[in-house]
Amino acid sequence: MHHKVYKCALQPFPPDLDEPILTIHQTISDVRGSFYQEKTVFLRCTVSSNPPARFIWKRETATLSHNQDNGVDIYEPLYTQGETKVLKLKNLRPQDYANYTCQVSVRNVCGIPDKSITFRLTNKTAPPALKMSVNETLVVNPGDNVTMQCTLTGGDPPPKAVWSHSPNPMPPNSISKGGNLTIRQIRAEDSGFYNCTAINNVGNPAKKTVNLLVRSMRNLTYQITPDVIKESETIQLGQDLKLSCHVDAVPQDKVQYTWYKNQKVIKTSDRIVITKNDLELPPVTSSLEIIDLRFSDYGTYLCDASLPNLPLTLNSSEINISAETVPPSISVPRGQLVITVREGSTAELQCEVRGKPLPPVLWTRMDKEATFPNGEKLIETPDGKLRLENVTREMSGGYKCQTARYNGFNIRSREAAVQLNVQFAPVVEPKFQDLRLPMKRSVTLRCNMLKGSPVKVATAVWRFERSLLSVPPIEQQEFSEYKINSTRRETSGTYECTISNDVGSDSCVFQVTGRAYNPEFYYDTPNPIESFKQFKNYSYLIQWTQKEPGAVDPVLHYKLELKPPNMKGMNSFVVISRDSRKGFLYELRLTDLKIPQHYEVKITPHTVSGPGDSASRSIRYKEPVNYQSDGTCRFEDDKLCGFVQDKYDTFDWIRQSKVNQSLRRTANTGPVMDRSGKPEGFYMFIEASRPRRFGDKARLISPLYNITSRLPSLKTTYCVSFYYHMYGRHIGNLTVLLRLKNIVSQDIPLWSKKGDQGNKWQLENLQVNPTAPFQIVFECVIGKGVEGDMAIDDVTIRKGECLKRQIPPTKAVAAPSSAARHPLSGFRLWLVSFLLFVLLR
């Protein structure tokens, strides 16, 4: 059986074979008592490979097969990633305790050797188990040396313990050895979940997790909340007042707060209420509520926060409560509402805050999706000044400043806005435009300013071949134009428009010319080479079309230059242009080329404007494809007349004859000999036996046929003729497809047969009218059994209509006495009838 051929250096996904992974499992209902006594066990072998790997299971050195005995089952599970084979040992027997090897192979593709993995199954085989030396939650101080021990308590083979940290990688100051993990000089950022996982590929991994908390406190803030019930925003005698204090801590629920007034600890009373966890504020926020504020309550308040066992206390700023404590206001200084700077410079935006105490100022962008250069959407400033360095055009827009609701009054934020304008040089289009025009045509060149700040053109300067052109002054607009009244050789060249604003400039470049575009070689010419080996010469049919022929004046002729590479001297030819329509195919047969020399060919179109753009290519000698004299491919040559195997099907066609066919071929299917009946004659064949499966596909693809016509409006007809053989109980499908080679290849079904068609070669003719270069594809799909071999032979693809088949007579031949004996009897009968008609008139 032939297998798919892999070209190691050219594959988009090169062949490879990873190391296999072997895991051991048992049915969930069996997990009781000892792990592997009188239980059902699954050995799962998984590998990633290209091409698909072949699996071999062995017990000791003996190969195991599916249903080898009642205790062994081998199958491929559903819904698995990669390739997997499972060896199932049912109701373990004494002989099942042994070494098991999973061997994977890609059949030495590209020299990749087989790989294997071995596991010893015993009556002690068990999944891993472990225990942890610390509690599930561990709280420590920063700077401590922390050790956590993960002890293995079970598993055979002996498991390996591995530590991991989430959500971040393991900290650099950690050391993991065996089951022990030590973190030296632990920091607040080392907090997180630490996982100890034990693995021995038996059952599921064992896992224990420790939530490690490093005590810390930061961001102590306070709030002043006037009487909420009376919706007040100021402090007034006779109304309620609440002071709040919050700190971000680990662990948060262990924070302790202490309130002071004039440096003395506050004692609670009927009017003074201290709450450790104010439900109206973030969790674990302490509040000091003063009911019916009195003059004696004026003073300086302070809040501090601490954690048990942490030698650190954080103090809030002093909170002065008096008649002078007033809510904030915010505004933009005069002349600072709009800030204009140039790209790359520094911008400073300012908002002034008044009040006592002065809260922080929070800056955001008016565009809610926009961020600051550091990626943040909010920036806090203590003095209301926002400094932006190296500003870019993307930073233009509105910026909002507002008072924070912490470290000050807890009331509605006061807001203001500043507009930032970043000026930058213009951006124009087109950067470069190649204009090909016939002579004596007018054209207007236009340079557009896509963006810039300021957005209007300040000046526009036009040059032709670096010389200044006279252009009327422009009004404030977003483009500049220059008109060429009549294109001539003298006006052909490079035009440049430089547009400027108050910041910088940018340029549009126009290349105006009557030069013809380059020719485009046609590389898919079928069998361009004709060999004359007796003279050691060959000829080459070169074909090309003209790119955009209507863009300029008609091409008058082509100059073709031919020379061997790295050699002096060349031959020149002139090909007269006969048709200026797009798609017209020119061709020239180059003769007297030396075998096996290759050559460089250069073609240049010429118009009234002179030579145009050239195109070059190499031509190389290649042994021509050998067809029979009648144009029929009988597959007698191993080059298959240019037919190729599809790289993306399941398997390949086989070139076969009665002489070289396998002695083990399946009976009652497939042809015995080729269509001619000669034992040494070859044909193309597909084998349906193992390892083929139902639905597998094999495709054979013809050479490419160029149907580009000298008159593109005319249709080109081709006849596809072939013999097929479809005999057997399990015959699948044989389909013929027309593959059109446009921008995207398109396969069009032409003909299809399914099922047993009899033990004989049968002829089929298909007439096609392709609209683009094409190939013919023969596709076989395997049926549901081994008696499904199919074959094709004597394939002909030629231009022209198919000959109509002569249908043999289905009726008996006329008796000698009948009119069939007299070729002219029909004419005589007509003549007599005509004379009678004339006489009767």
Image (spheres, rainbow, N blue to C red):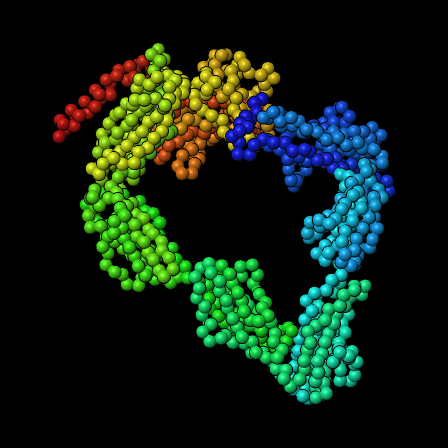
Position of residue 84 measured from the top left corner of the image (x, y, whole percent): 67, 35
Residue at horizontal 72%, vertical 64%? 217
Return the x and y of residue 140 as percentages of the image width and height.
Answer: 79, 58
Name the residue nearer the viewer: 47 or 382: 382
Q: Position of residue 574 (x, y in %)?
A: 24, 27
- The C terminus lies in which quarter of the figure? top left
The image shows residue 764, relative to residue 445, as above or below, that is: above
Q: Which of these two is toward me, 648 or 835? A: 648
- Residue displayed at 70% across by 85% down: 298
Q: How many marks?
A: 0
Name the one closer to the observer, 354 or 796.
354
* In the rendered image, the vertical position of residue 495 relative to residue 348, given as above or below: above
Q: Say left or right for 360 vs 188.
A: left
**Percent coordinates x, y for residue 386 in the rendering:** 53, 67
- Residue drawn at 32 percent across, 54 percent down: 498
Q: Quadrant of residue 585?
A: top left
In what quadrant of the picture does the N terminus appear?
top right
> Would you say residue 366 is visible in this rendering?
no
Task: Give the vertical position of 104 relative to 156 (above or below).
Answer: above
Q: Which residue is at the far right?
A: 33
468 on left or right of 223: left
* Residue 267 seen from this side: yes
Q: Is residue 608 left or right of residue 121?
A: left
Q: Is residue 647 left or right of residue 184?
A: left
Residue 487 in the image: above or below residue 505: above
Residue occupying the point 23% across, 59% down:
472
